[in-house]
């Protein structure tokens, strides 16, 4: 008979079950109370490890790459992401009010959950599987993201997104969107006549080059819709550059990879983390401060510990 290998221990020295690869499934230490097992505290993930995980995620690393870098299980990374994402969502909801945003640009960025839209079948939940869009609003002057919304690209989500935006900004803004028609009724319902609104319609030529190369822009037509928008300020350049930032800093938005979101809850947590980090922690190279500081929301640069606690 050959020599048999000893099985992996079911419980680590501090009482936590180990994974198949011998790494403990650590739990973040902000769980209510300190759970104990047989008189010993459970394996709590140190705050330094949590900060390393969050730092890796906001800098564009995938879940499994982060797990390898920090030397934890990928399920531990997911737990930290979900809990921190919930905390970041609360921060954004509490802090983003009465904002002095004068030049707003709105756009949507595409991604998908679980599978591509063409593979969605009757067994899937159509609201959570397939194409998902992140509606994003951005102030051109402070680069602040006042609000965002994740969901299908339809009239209902557009309306709720604009209503949320209107409730968070003060004064009479100038708003620019692309040619998505539901914006017209949504902005009228939200602001009425107290807005200067214009669309920027871009005309594209045929893409005869690489299959994934963007089509060439033939013309851009600024179209005033309501109020008196200033022609020189009708632009979507800043929000489109923000879309690039999202794709660079959030691995799950990278095309042609396996890092796409498997669940809608994961996508929402990742976006909440990104936008909170972008608004409060990341110093904008053009502003020399964070967008939240430029907008007067806070007076200091936040560290990642502020997003966790």
Image: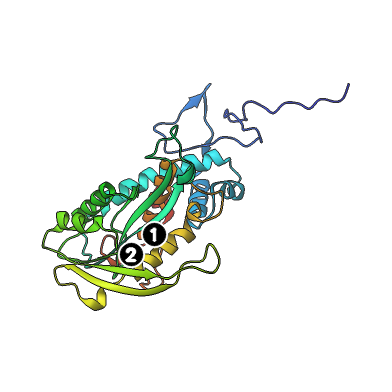
Mark 2, secondary structure of its residue: helix
Q: Please state which of residues 67 and 221 is positioned toward the viewer in this rendering.
A: 221
Write down the residue under mark 2.
291
The earlier-in-sequence mark between 2 and 1 is: 1
Write down the residue under mark 1.
278
Task: Judge left or right: residue 257 versus residue 163.
Answer: right
Q: Quadrant of the N terminus?
A: top right
Percent of width and height locating residue 146: 28, 58
Q: Is residue 268 visible?
A: yes
Percent of width and height locating residue 147: 29, 55
In the image, residue 61 sits, relative to residue 123, either above or below, namely: below
Q: Quadrant of residue 230?
A: bottom left
In the image, residue 285 sits, relative to residue 211, either above or below, namely: below
In the rendering, which numbered label is found on residue 101?
none
Percent of width and height locating residue 244: 44, 64
Badge 1 density bin: few <14, some 14–19, many ≥20, Cα 10 Å: many
Whether the residues at callouts 2 and 1 have beta carbons within 8 Å, the answer is yes
Q: Name, please, the residue furthest toward the bottom.
A: 232
Percent of width and height locating residue 155: 26, 49
Q: Residue at x 24, y 57 (%)?
A: 183
Q: Please state which of residues 24 and 191 is positioned toward the viewer in this rendering.
A: 191
Task: Judge left or right: residue 259 versus residue 306.
Answer: right
Q: Quadrant of residue 13?
A: top right
Mark 1, secondary structure of its residue: helix
Measured Cα–Cα span from mark 2 to mark 1: 8 Å
């Amino acid at each position: 008979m050959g020599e048999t290998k000893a099985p992996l221990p079911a419980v680590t020295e501090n009482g936590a079950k180990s994974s198949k690869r011998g790494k403990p499934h650590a739990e973040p230490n902000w769980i209510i109370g300190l759970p104990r097992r047989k008189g010993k505290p459970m394996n709590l993930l140190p705050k330094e490890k949590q900060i390393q995980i969050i730092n890796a995620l906001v800098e564009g690393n995938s879940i499994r790459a982060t797990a390898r870098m920090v030397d934890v299980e990928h399920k531990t990374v997911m737990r930290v992401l979900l809990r921190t994402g919930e905390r970041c969502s609360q921060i954004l909801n509490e802090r983003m009010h009465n904002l002095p945003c004068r030049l707003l640009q709105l756009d949507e960025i595409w991604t998908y959950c679980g599978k591509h839209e063409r593979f969605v079948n009757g067994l899937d939940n159509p609201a959570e599987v397939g194409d998902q869009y992140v509606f994003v609003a951005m102030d051109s002057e402070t680069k602040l993201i006042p609000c965002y919304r994740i969901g299908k690209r339809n009239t209902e989500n557009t309306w709720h997104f604009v209503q949320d935006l209107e409730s968070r900004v003060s004064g009479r803004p100038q708003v620019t969107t692309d040619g998505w028609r539901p914006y017209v009724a949504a902005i009228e319902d939200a602001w009425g006549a107290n807005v200067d609104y214009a669309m920027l319609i871009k005309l594209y030529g045929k893409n005869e080059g690489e299959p994934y190369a963007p089509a060439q822009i033939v013309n851009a037509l600024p179209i005033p819709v309501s109020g008196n928008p200033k022609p020189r300020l009708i632009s979507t350049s800043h929000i489109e550059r923000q879309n690039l930032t999202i794709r660079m800093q959030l691995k799950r938005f990278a095309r042609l990879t396996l890092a796409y979101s498997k669940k809608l809850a994961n996508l929402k947590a990742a976006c909440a983390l990104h936008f909170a980090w972008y608004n409060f922690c990341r110093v904008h190279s053009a502003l020399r401060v964070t967008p939240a500081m430029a907008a007067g929301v806070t007076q200091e640069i936040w560290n990642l510990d502020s997003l966790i606690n």
